[in-house]
Image (cartoon, rainbow, N blue to C red):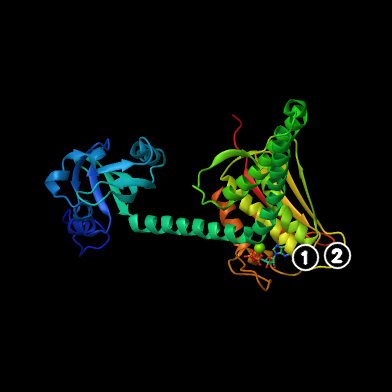
Amino acid sequence: MSPAHLGGLPDLDYVEFARCLFEESNDAFIIVDPDFETVLDVNATTLRLTQRRKQELAPSSIADLLSSDEQDGLAKVVAAFQKTGLFHSREGFSLATREDGPLQVNISVSRIHTSQRVLGLIVARDITARKRAEEANLRLQDELAHIARLAAIGETVAEISHEINQPLSAVANYAAASREKLNGDDPLAELDSVRKWVDHISSAAILAGSLCHRLSSFVKKTDGQLEAHDIKDIVTEIIDIARWDAKRAKAKLSFEADAAEMRALVNRVEIQQVVLNLIKNACESLAATDQTDKVVKIRATVQNDCVTVAVEDSGPGFGEADVERLFTPFVTTKQSGLGMGLAICRSIIKKHGGSIDAANRSPTGARLQFTLPRAATA
Ligand SMILES: Nc1ncnc2c1ncn2[C@@H]1O[C@H](COP(=O)(O)OP(=O)(O)OP(=O)(O)O)[C@@H](O)[C@H]1O
Ligand SMILES: [Mg+2]
């Protein structure tokens, strides 16, 4: 038997088969030295993807051709391969091209032991299109969440602007009264009253300012940044906006929190959007009933490495409905509902590495709660 016929198919020329596999693969095959430092040979797909000629790439430094999001990314994949002996693949690599921007690739590495020499092999798969689609999808989700935030707050804006009017009227009245005193016959004798009114003006302006700030930061587009925040503060801030929904439903809104520190790595506005959606749903379920004692309770608790926020109401609950289905987009039982609230909540909580679920309460009502991993203490 010729050395070319070593496999189980005697009529197959395995050398030619290996050459076809190498040249005709849709993946870039890069043969390197056993230390994964120098490119020794590449296949036609590598040349096509990088828009280079073979003489430019072999020999060359692998670091010029392949870069990683992580420091020593390639060394880590090689180390993982060495540890397990298994073909190890990982994303987060870029293949340099001559003209177009770098291509995003997934790489797999292995060592080939032939009778003559040991070689390293890197197989790079172009995942640029998939990554772009994923990024576009994430951008769309952010846009959708932003639109939903605007919609969630729509009804409340008129009520809040009405509330802001009160401190602003107080500012105008105290300022007018102060001016009158200061223009009087003996302004120095009035200094004590004027000082007191200036204090009132200051606190009224701070109140109006903080309401405006809360509202505007909620409706702004977020930059997606995660920061360590105390979940208690996040919930307290959004309750200031959600209390309008409770007022409309004639429900009593309460908030209890464990004394323990409950910091989590989150995007503040997105978590506020989740809490607001849950409170809104609770209030909407109560608004539809003729109960006299309508209650929405929010609790924030800490357990081991997790922070849990639960929103409970005394409404009718979900009955026999499949609660998992309610997290699917466009599933709604409301005439004017879009059915996006819980779907957005789940995608936000998932993005934060947490989980969210819903259950009926006994004897009546619903409980929706989400759990987030706790941030390591500084
Ligand atoms: N606290 C609750 N009590 C009873 N049913 C609830 C509660 N929260 C959610 N649901 C049910 O889950 C469904 C889906 O809720 P979701 O927030 O996703 O959409 P929606 O409130 O109907 O519409 P949208 O939030 O888009 O305006 C609701 O239509 C309702 O039937
Ligand atoms: Mg809703």
Which of the labelled discs sits on residue 291, or is there none? 2
Q: Residue at x 18, y 60 (%)?
A: 13
Q: Are marks 1 and 2 in contact (CB under 8 Å)?
A: no
Quadrant of res 343: bottom right
Is residue 329 among what the camera can see?
A: yes
Work out whether 365 lies above or below 205. Answer: below
- Label 1 SS: helix
Residue 174 quadrant: top right
Residue furthest toward the left? Answer: 55
Residue 47 in the image: above or below residue 56: below
Residue 89 visible, this angle: no
Name the one closer to the observer, 112 or 203: 203
Figure label count:
2
Residue located 80% across and 63% down the image: 315
Question: In the image, residue 300 lies at what x, y percent?
Answer: 72, 44
Residue 99 lies, in percent from the top left, at 20, 50
Amino acid at dot 1: Ala
Give 203 or 169, whichever is nearer the viewer. Answer: 169
In this rendering, would 143 be left or right of 364? left
In the depicted structure, whether residue 293 falls above or below residue 227:
below
Name the foreground residue: 361 vs 286. 286
Please state which amino acid type lies under the numbered disc 2.
Gln
From the viewer's perspective, is 309 left or right of 293?
Answer: left
User: Could you give the CA–CA distance between mark 1 and mark 2, rounded to whole angstroms?
Assistant: 9 Å
Q: Which residue is mark 1?
A: 287
Q: Quadrant of the C terminus?
A: top right
Instruction: Give x and y (percent) for residue 328.
Output: 60, 66
**Mark 2, residues whose alpha carbon is within 10 Å: few (<14), some, or many (≥20)?**
some
Horizontal and vertical percent position of residue 75 = 34, 36
* Rendered-image quarter of ligand 1: bottom right
